[in-house]
Image: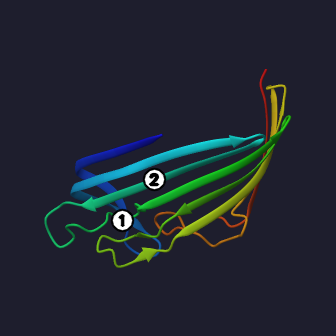
Amino acid sequence: MAAYFRGVTENLIQFVQTSSATAKPFNFGQADLRGLEVEASGRAGPLLVTAAYTWTRAVNATPGATYGLLIPSRPVHALRTRATLSRGPLHVYHELLHISGNPIDTLNQFKLGARNIHAIGAIVDQKDRVRFSIEIKNLSNNQVADLYGVPLPGLTLAMRLSALF
């Protein structure tokens, strides 16, 4: 599946980092946003592989010194892949999220580097009524930041038990 999108926006409000600890809303008079999203999946026996890629180009279209520069905190590339191996009620997976580097200021002088975040997990389904899952996120314990430069948690363990009644 693939989808192209484009929008010319007036008065786009975007949070822009103003110091290492603060961000403020900034009004871009005009913005030209375009992109492409592609998704694919394939199965080989018990293995299911999925991938989703997004290319986004968000440019300041307001006349002035920052005309044509990228809008902060909008990475150009994002890729998510997941490989799941299933045997009966057990599903084991690996997931990779890659986000390209992106500017965090209106002059595109300060940039965050690319981020790669790996996760592994397992899900056990019991008769579609009870589900237990365990996931380890940021497996390599990378010191990554969100789109605004705020540090995200390192290695994280999450467990969940859900039941339908």
Name the residue: 27% across, 46% down.
Answer: 7
Report which residue position mark 1 lands on.
72
Q: How many numbered discs sit on the rendered protein?
A: 2
Mark 1: few/some/many CA within 10 Å (<14, 14-19, 20+): many
Q: Is residue 70 left or right of residue 100?
A: left
Classify 164 as above or below 108.
above
N-terminal of the pair, mark 1 or mark 2, is 2
Regarding mark 2 in the picture, which secondary structure is present there?
strand
Name the residue: 50% across, 74% down.
Answer: 113
| Amino acid at circle 2 | Thr
Residue, far bottom: 109
Name the residue: 55% across, 44% down.
Answer: 40
Classify 69 as above or below 127.
below
Classify 35 as above or below 99.
above
Q: Is residue 104 left or right of residue 107?
A: right
For residue 25, what is the image quadrant?
A: bottom left
Q: Is residue 135 left or right of residue 152?
A: right
Report which residue position mark 2 lands on.
54
Residue 155, given in percent of the width and then of the height, sits at 73, 65
Classify 80 as above or below 152.
above
Q: In the image, which is nearer the foreground, mark 1 or mark 2?
A: 2
Using the rendered image of the protein, determine whether residue 72 is visible from the camera's viewpoint: yes
Regarding mark 1 in the picture, which secondary structure is present there?
loop
Residue, far top: 165
Q: What's the distance in space between the residues labelled 1 and 2, CA to CA?
A: 17 Å
Residue 110, given in percent of the width and then of the height, sits at 39, 78
Q: Quadrant of the C terminus?
A: top right
Name the residue: 31% across, 66% down.
Answer: 70
